[in-house]
């Protein structure tokens, strides 16, 4: 192995073939033993999505062998992640990023966004029905 003079610390390049990006995302191919490959953000996301998708597909915790298999399938271009919502959630957990980064293919009103202020409903006519939380204007036992 050639050892370069280490005067100028340059970040490694992304390990994905053909990707010329700087790799500022060390990716754990396996955790035990700790084997790390340098990746750029985009490729780190891809492999992380793949790992997640494969784990869900087989309902298993990824073994080291499995993780390497995924790694090489991915490097060879045989395995590509689908940018599903699940996959995005998977990576959202570990990297904060602008929302514009991924376009939402289908608008999924999962989280209700309340743009209208909650108007206090007039329950005047229904005091009887809502008696338990509209104040105890009259005791139910009062006669
Ligand atoms: Zn890359």
Image: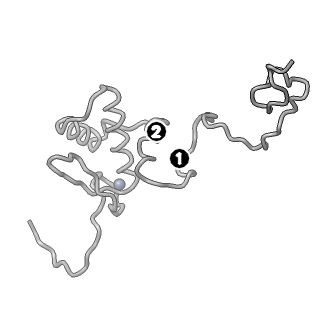
Q: Residue furthest right?
A: 125
Secondary structure beneath dot 1 equals loop
Q: How far from the left and from the top, in percent, is residue 112?
A: 66, 37
In primary-sequence order, the first of circles 1 and 2 is 2
Q: Residue at x 68, y 41 (%)?
A: 113
Q: Which residue is mark 2?
A: 83
Depth check: give the residue in front, 31 or 2. Answer: 31
Classify 10 Å Cα crowding around label 2: few (below 14), some (14-19), many (20 and above).
some
Q: Which of the pair 84/22 is nearer the observer?
A: 84
Residue 10 drawn at (x, y percent): 28, 72
Q: Is residue 80 above or below residue 97?
A: above
Determine the residue positioned at 34% across, 27% down.
Answer: 57
Ligand 1 shown in quarter: bottom left
Crowding at dot 1, Cα within 10 Å, few <14 / some 14-19 / many 20+, comes out as few
Residue 50 numbered tag: none
In this view of the protein, which residue sits in the foreground, 33 or 51?
Answer: 33
User: Residue, x 43% and y 38% (percent of image)?
Assistant: 87
Q: Percent from the top left, x then y, of residue 106?
A: 60, 34
Residue extending farthest to the left is: 1
Q: Which residue is mark 1?
A: 102
């Amino acid at each position: 192995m050639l050892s370069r003079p280490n005067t100028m610390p340059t970040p490694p390049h992304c390990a994905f073939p053909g990707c010329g990006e700087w790799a500022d995302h060390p990716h754990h191919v396996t955790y035990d033993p700790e084997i790390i490959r340098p990746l750029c953000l985009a490729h780190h996301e891809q492999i992380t999505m793949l790992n997640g998708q494969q784990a869900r597909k087989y309902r298993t915790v990824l073994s080291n062998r499995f993780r390497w298999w995924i790694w090489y399938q991915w490097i060879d271009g045989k395995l590509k992640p689908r940018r599903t919502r699940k996959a995005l959630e998977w990576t959202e957990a570990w990297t904060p990023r602008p929302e514009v980064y991924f376009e939402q293919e289908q608008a999924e009103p999962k989280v209700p966004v309340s743009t209208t202020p909650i108007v206090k409903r007039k329950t005047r006519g229904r005091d009887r029905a809502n008696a338990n939380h509209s104040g105890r204007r009259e005791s139910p036992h009062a006669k």
